[in-house]
Amino acid sequence: MVLIPFEDFEVVASKTVPAVYDEVGDLVKEETVIPEKKVQVSDHFFMDVHEVTVGQFKEFLIPKVIGLSIQEVY
């Protein structure tokens, strides 16, 4: 686990989605510029350094919380 400090940080950098044209060359959708998004975290929190799937988390959590094996649950 690592500490994520209280601060403003960029979540998604800005990007441009190119224009879309149909088969005869008519504009279907204009070019779109998606601005960068900044987020402010209101408090420190911890985040794991390793990704965990829902299935992996269930395998860990179910025996600890309700005392059953995965086979007994499914």
Image (cartoon, rainbow, N blue to C red):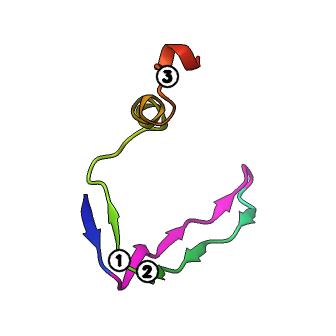
> Where is residue 65 drawn, in percent x and y?
48, 36
Identify which amino acid the numbered label 2 is placed on. Answer: Val
The residue located at (35%, 83%) in the rendering is 6
Residue 66 placement, left or right of 51: right
Q: Earlier in the sequence, mark 1 or mark 3?
A: 1
Residue 27 placement, left or right of 63: right
Disc 1 crowd, CA 10 A, few/some/many (<14, 14-19, 20+): few
Tag in front: 1 or 3: 3
- Return the residue nearer the eye: 49 or 69: 69
Disc 3 crowd, CA 10 A, few/some/many (<14, 14-19, 20+): few
In this picture, is 72 found above or below 32? Answer: above
The part of the image, by quadrant, that contains residue 47 is bottom left
Task: Give me the C-alpha separation between circle 3 and circle 2.
Answer: 37 Å
Q: Which residue is mark 2?
A: 41
* The magenta stretch spans residue 70: no
In this picture, is 54 found above or below 44? Answer: above
Identify which amino acid the numbered label 1 is placed on. Answer: His
Report the span colored magenta: 6-24
Q: Which mark is residue 44?
A: 1
Identify which amino acid the numbered label 3 is placed on. Answer: Leu
The part of the image, by quadrant, that contains residue 43 is bottom left
Tag in front: 3 or 2: 3
- Return the residue nearer the eye: 46 or 33: 46
- Return the residue nearer the eye: 59 or 39: 59
Proximity of marks 2 and 1: CB atoms separated by less than 8 Å: yes
- Return the residue nearer the eye: 35 or 65: 65
Q: Which residue is mark 3?
A: 68
> Where is residue 54 drawn, in percent x and y?
48, 38
